[in-house]
Image (cartoon, rainbow, N blue to C red):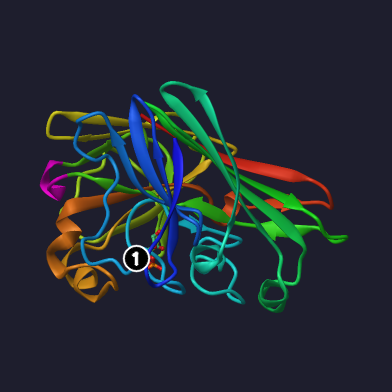
């Protein structure tokens, strides 16, 4: 079942529920901010103090960073403009009693053309079941080709950062954004300081382990993965979250970032897909 819910301040979201799972997806940013599977602990992390208001990105869940990752396009805001853009709810489909599909879409507007002078169509297709899958599909509707970087910037709940281990990135080239150096990652990733790195040549499953939980992330249309935790000092400066909340999450982002950028010719499409289980 899919219901459209409206907060008093005009902030709208879709509530998806079926026999296996449930999810909440804001129309602003096509932002999945909740995903629950049966009685299990949330896989996604959402800040208790996040704003839910037009013009402010939700802190947590799965922000859609588009048409730029980070500052990969210095002419655009950090992570592009899709996070605070109003998507339209196109349709929903009950695939089965325990799987629901929802499609949201964004097209160029006078405002977007001032920021990024290309006509486009951006669709997020979300499938909610005992697996959460997202397909972010970009179509070039312009007469010029354009360069695209992007990410599904997923915040994963880890209960406490001291428990978290990220597997699947050993042997990959790592750009450490904090130190500005590139080297080969030699072991699984644990966290004891600020961590902000982009891994390239990633075409395999990533596993996030914490406590007795194991979360699988499989990407398609992507060969870069971003791993981020702000740690203490940056965590205290982040908007929309309590200072100590850095301990509760790790971001593992399915991306086309840095050298994994894509160029779309007129009428070409590219899909970035993430399957989370
Ligand atoms: O993906 C990691 C990152 O680029 C970090 O450097 C940090 O800025 C994070 O994204 C959050 O960015 P935001 O714009 O949501 O505050």
For the N terminus, the quadrant is: top left
Is 213 situated left or right of 204 in this image? left
Task: Tell me if 73 is positioned left or right of 174 in this view.
Answer: right
Work out which residue is located at the far right of the displayed protein and give it.
Answer: 143
Residue at the image point whose x is 84% and y is 52% from the top: 266
Relative to 86, residue 236 above or below: below
**Residue 15 found in image quarter:** top left
Residue 66 position within the rendered picture, expressed as x and y whole percent measured from the top left = 57, 59
Q: For the C terminus, which image quadrant?
A: top left
Front residue of this view, candidates 34 and 154: 34
Q: Which residue is drawn at 39% across and 72% down?
A: 9
255 left or right, relative to 46? right
Q: Where are the magenta residues, as a range?
A: 159-163
Task: Say if the magenta span includes residue 262.
Answer: no
In this rendering, the answer to whether 173 lies above or below 197 is: above
Q: Is residue 160 above or below residue 142?
A: above
Q: Residues within 10 Å of mark 1 (few under 14, many from 20)?
A: few
Q: Find residue 209 and report its image quarter.
A: top left
Q: Which of 193 and 57 is in front in this view?
A: 57
- Rendering quadrant holding ligand 1: bottom left
Q: Is residue 254 visible?
A: yes
Relative vertical location of residue 78 with respect to residue 163 in this rendering, above or below: below
As drawn, the residue found furthest toward the top would be 96
* Residue with the mark numbered 1: 178
User: Residue at left 40%, top 28%?
Assistant: 129
Q: Which SS type dominates the magenta stretch?
A: helix
The picture places residue 205, in percent across and down from the top left corner, at: 41, 29
Q: Where does the image place residue 204, in percent across and percent down from the top left?
A: 45, 29
């Amino acid at each position: 079942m899919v219901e459209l819910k409206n907060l008093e301040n005009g902030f709208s979201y879709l509530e998806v529920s079926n026999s296996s799972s449930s999810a909440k997806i804001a129309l602003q940013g096509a932002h999945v901010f909740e995903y629950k599977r049966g009685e299990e602990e949330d896989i996604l992390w959402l800040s208790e103090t996040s704003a839910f208001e037009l013009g402010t990105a939700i802190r947590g869940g799965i922000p859609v960073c588009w048409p730029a990752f980070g500052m990969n396009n210095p002419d655009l805001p950090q992570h592009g403009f899709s996070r605070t853009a109003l998507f339209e709810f196109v349709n929903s489909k009950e695939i089965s009693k325990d799987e629901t599909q929802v499609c949201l879409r964004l097209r160029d507007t006078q405002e977007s053309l001032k920021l990024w002078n290309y006509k486009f169509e951006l669709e997020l297709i979300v499938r909610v079941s005992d697996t959460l899958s997202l397909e972010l599909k970009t179509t070039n509707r312009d007469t010029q080709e354009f360069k695209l970087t992007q990410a599904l910037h997923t915040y994963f709940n880890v209960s406490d950062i001291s428990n978290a281990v990220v597997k699947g990135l050993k042997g990959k080239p790592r750009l450490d954004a904090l130190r500005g150096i590139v080297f080969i990652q030699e072991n699984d990733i644990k966290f004891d300081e600020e961590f902000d790195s982009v891994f390239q040549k990633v075409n395999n499953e990533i596993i996030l382990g914490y406590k007795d939980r194991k979360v699988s992330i499989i990407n398609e249309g992507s060969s870069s993965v971003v791993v981020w935790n702000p740690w203490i000092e940056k965590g205290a400066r982040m908007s929309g979250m309590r200072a100590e909340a850095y301990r509760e999450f790790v971001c593992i982002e399915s991306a086309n970032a840095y050298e994994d950028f894509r160029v779309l010719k007129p009428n070409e499409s590219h899909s970035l897909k993430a399957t989370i289980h």
